[in-house]
Image (cartoon, grey):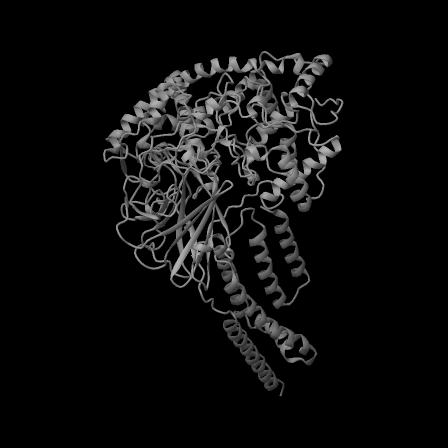
Amino acid sequence: MSTSRKKWLGPRVLAQRVLAAAVLGFALLPTSLAAQDASNELGLEVYTKWCGHCHGDQGDGLGVAASRLKPVPRDFTSGKYKIRMTTTGNIPTDADLTRAIRLGLYGTSMPAFTENYLSDAEVSAVVEYIKSFSDWFEDPELQNPETITIPEPPTYDLEAAQTLGRQVYEETGCARCHGEHGRGDGMSAPTLVDDWGNHIRVADLTKPWTFRGGGTRKDIFRSMSTGFNGTPMPGFHNNLGATPEESQQRMWAIVDYMLSLAGGPWEDGETPYANLLRSVPVETELDLEQGTELFAAAPKATFPLFGQIVEPGRNFYPSAVEVTAQAIHNEDEIAFRITWNDMRAETGGSNAPDLPAPLWDDHLAEIGQATAGVSDAGDDEGGFWGDEEVEEAEDEGGFWGDEEVAEAEDEGGFWGDEEVAEDDGGDDFWGEEEGGDAAAASDTLDTEFSDAFALQFPLQKPEGVRQPYFLFGDVQNPVDLWFVDLAKPTVGQRYEGRGSSALSPSEGGDEVITQATFDNGEWSVIFKRKRKGSGLSFEEDAFLPIAFSVWDGFNRERGNKRGLSAWYQVYLEPLEKPSPVGPMTRAGLTVLGLELLFIAMVRRRNGKTVS
Amino acid sequence: MNWWVLIAFVAAMLVLRWRRVGILTWVAAWLVGLYLVLNYVFVVPVPVSVIKIYMGIVSLSLFAFVLTDSQRMTEFWQPIQAFVVEPRYRPLLALVALAIPALVAFRIYADMTATPQAPFFARTVHPAPPDSIIVHDSELALGTADNPYRDLETSNPEEFKERLEKGRAVYYLNCFYCHGDLMAGAGMYAHALNPIPTNFQDPGTIAMLREAFLYWRIAKGAPGMPEEGGPWQSAMPAWESFLTEEEMWNVILFLYDFTGYQPRAVELH
């Protein structure tokens, strides 16, 4: 597939390059255009079993799951693919499509179809089948696209990363979308849309384990070189320096700069997740004026979040994917610091854990793109929280059943129209990168709900293994929520939860003191409370359940529509650690004494027998 | 199974037997050999607690083996006695006498300074179902109930196919976030869940269960689980709040069809 072409010398505007590439492509003409096997029965069979429910039987990305997936499934009719070895604007190679199928796309519902599921022959067949959805794969002008080669990476160089890499990051304007420190919080992040008009979330560069195309150095080099077709992410192949060599050098520097944000090179498959938060003892007063400094000695533990999809208020695409926690305590008090990355701080409006939320979250409806019927379903804030849950459920069930069919069809029609329009302007994504499409995006800018955060503990120390239900507790086992609405960051609130439909503000009791800051895409929230008092007592040398909830106002998260964690544990290290020296000496001496006794006895007995 | 370790163990024991080594060496060889077998022969790691139990049993048996015969007893005892008494072993004896207390002390140090590990709740993965459940006002006896649409597979293949399609829609609107597109329990949220979602491709899950059991687990979810299943921590929703009975039976048909497994039949007593 790969053809060598003249390298472009010097930086050019991409629009020029795309035009030139098209002309060049036309001149070369396809050497062999694989004749589409009209009866690719194996491909159809594989596609129907494994792909159609998301990508749609017509390949338009509108399978039954599409309305509840974000990022939306790939629309194969467009020919636009993100993860490629071909340069910007080009169709992918068969190897690119095979890669996506075999490895999946991290952080999305696209799984890795390993050999356990599909043979090589089946993958080739389905690759051909997928290509048959788009004219682009038959267009003579687009054949034999220019591909890049990824050179062997030089040794990871933190110094170069932080100087040259940072410099290239600034010069190239990465911060405009990805943010000053790469946390996906650039100025234009809230307004970015893809070629289909969907808002898309900018990659958080500090988390390579969430990168769709993989987070190894070579993966990032590829993504940086080729860009993501159909999105505002451009490709910088040979475009970062005056010569290809210089461009390559600067490319590695920026790749390493990104990885330095995540703490260094990332091994494929690594995640930073823990299951225990260790609270370390400190001698000093827990003076919140010191802010982050106070937690300098406390180890960080990162916990993954998922969308609340268990109960009404289902949140299929939560904004926050993880939180990082620290904890410290002294004789009287305990303090927690939690950080997470957010595209933008929503400090207008309000939020609370007991606000009514729609039955489920339809992102198409929420950005004003779905049909009226769908948005009705999404916005029905009615009382499924009530007592007559069973009756409600029956109604809902029937209602959903009917709705789904209609929904899919409607959207199909709607999208179908959209695509025709889109196809006319194939190279348009440059324009959008310049911040266009503000009209579509402005619908998404909403200040009704503020960002919010909650820590969850059992209200009483659990007896044995039994914990409260992790979704805001249950009737017999209530939870204690420490909640902060980030529109009012200094007002710590407490709720007693006996289930998500039975949350009530705690009357009286010990105050929870809060403090919050937002810095370049990172929320940092500190909670402080007395260790003993009303609610849970934070005993030393004990494990206590802890869970986290994040609400992103931008994503209209409120009430039970939230990102949350499972139960994890917090362990308070004793203020005075028992020294191991005493027990060690005692045990050692005891054993030694027994040994000497044994030796003496054996020798004595031996002496007797000999004499 | 790591056969090479097992073969090496058997070969080593045969060589020792052939060389007619002393009983002390023989006992030591058994202890060390079985420890290695337990640790390295099985592909799925054997839990430390189980290994401790086995090694305890092995030690007792060897002890009994030695004690029950005075010949063996003497043979076992002589090298130890020689080691303790004979002057030529004195430096080595001193070294051993100091090394053992040092090891004990080190063990205590390691235990006392180790990073604490979060406690682990050993939940029952497939807890026993109740006799009957009530879903949307209708009672279902779990012991005898079967999927009301299973018969269609032979009696009305057309309708069966339609139901599979409806089941597919239910699955890909609701279940795949956790159980995964491939039904292998590796959905996009799986890494954030504890317990992890069930892997339906594993022959130890739905292939071993009856459809009524699945119906119970789907309709009542985690909150309907008995205590031994850990109902407070599983993220399995009670799907009766979202789905009709028909939708739940349809998705069960789809689970079996997609994975190619057959449900366990109702046992007729």
**Residue B119 in sight in this render:** no
Q: Nearer the viewer, residue A386 or B260?
A: A386
| Left or right: A592, with A466 as reference point | right
| Left or right: A581, with B149 as reference point | right
Question: Among all residues in the image, which is located at the extreme bottom?
Answer: A611
Q: Nearer the viewer, residue A25 or B221?
A: A25
Residue A163: x, y in percent? Answer: 67, 43
Give the residue displayed 63% in from the left and 37% down from the top: A169
Q: If the image is split into quadrants, where does the C terminus of chain B sit?
A: top left
Residue A588 vertical position relative to residue A230 in the rendered view, above or below: below
Give the residue displayed 51% in from the left and 32% down from the top: A189
Quadrant for residue A129, please give it. top right
| Left or right: A412, with A3 as reference point | left
Quadrant for residue A36, please give it. top right
Quadrant for residue A601, please give it. bottom right
Residue A270: x, y in percent? Answer: 57, 43
**Residue A7 in sight in this render:** yes
Residue A146 vertical position relative to residue B34 in the rendered view, above or below: above
Residue A85: x, y in percent? Answer: 66, 27
Q: Nearer the viewer, residue A317 or A516?
A: A516
Number of marks in the rendered image? 0
Residue B66: x, y in percent? Answer: 55, 68
